[in-house]
Image (spheres, rainbow, N blue to C red):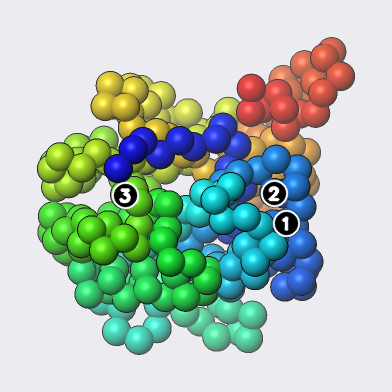
Amino acid sequence: MGRLNLPQLILGTMDRRQGTNEERIELFIEAFESGFRAFDTAPLYDFGGAEKQLGRALDSIPREKVLVLTKVGLGWDGDAHGDVLFEYADDSGNMRSVRKDSRPESILQEVDRSLDRLGLETLDLVQIHHPDRKVPLVESMGALLDLMHEGKLRHIGVSNFSPQEVNAAQEALGEVPLATVQQDYSLVRREIESDLIPLCQAQSIDLIVFSPLGEGMLAGKPAPSSHKGFQQIADVVNSVLLPIADQHNVSSAAVALA
């Protein structure tokens, strides 16, 4: 299996709950037409809804021209076994407990469900969404390796893992390289510069970052003052990003990403 050649920009599908399903599907198609060649999704996003909408969009997009990245390791309802990650009220007002669940049987089931929702035969990348410390990592990685050998996925990665857990994941994979690590990183969240980024560079692991625009606020999106870190982000936008953006006649988002 060759290296996963990720583009510099990947469209995330997490915060797509606003608008109708058709509007979200149109957004994904427009993203492809604008030059995006990779989509990052997960079963958790809109409880399967994001994968279904992306799958609908992929009906209009040449499969060989895009990378589809998804995740496993979080469950809700049913018999999800692990520690609660968070509780969430769905659109109907029902409370759902999202739990870490990286049992092999859960991973096998999740991948099949993702393939069905996306309308695909193979996923380009599957990442463990959050570490599940109640399940031996070698067992979780073993399930992903089995799926790789079956042709259901091409590459394996992890998300929200510490540097120590990244090393353990690579050890569990043996000769199969860990393709990616996904982590929160932006102008106002730079903790990983001291340890995770050097580790990825040393081991040739691709880094995928989420919230590089601070959930849109570094691009000028307003947020309530109750948002954690809101004032810090607002200060960065007003005192740093906007003056540089004005000087170079570009957006604050372009400055933040650069």
Which residue is identified by label 2? 32
- Name the amino acid type tagged 1: Ile
> Which one is in front, 70 or 147?
147
Residue 165 horizontal side relative to residue 158, left or right:
left
How far from the left and from the top, in percent, is residue 74?
A: 37, 67
Say which residue appears at 32% left-offset and 76% top-offset.
109
Residue 112 horizontal side relative to residue 189, left or right:
left
- Name the amino acid type tagged 3: Ile
Q: CA distance from mark 2 to mark 1?
A: 5 Å
Say which residue appears at 56% left-offset and 77% top-offset.
89
> Which one is in front, 238 or 17?
17
Residue 60's disc is none
Q: CA distance from mark 1 to mark 3?
A: 26 Å
Instruction: Report which quarter residue 204 is drawn in.
Output: top left
Precedes in sequence: disc 1 or disc 3: 1
How far from the left and from the top, in percent, is residue 217?
A: 70, 41
Precedes in sequence: disc 3 or disc 2: 2
> Which one is in front, 41 or 89?
41
How far from the left and from the top, in percent, is residue 149?
A: 23, 58
Q: Is residue 130 above or below residue 8?
A: below
Which residue is identified by label 3? 156
Which residue is identified by label 1? 29
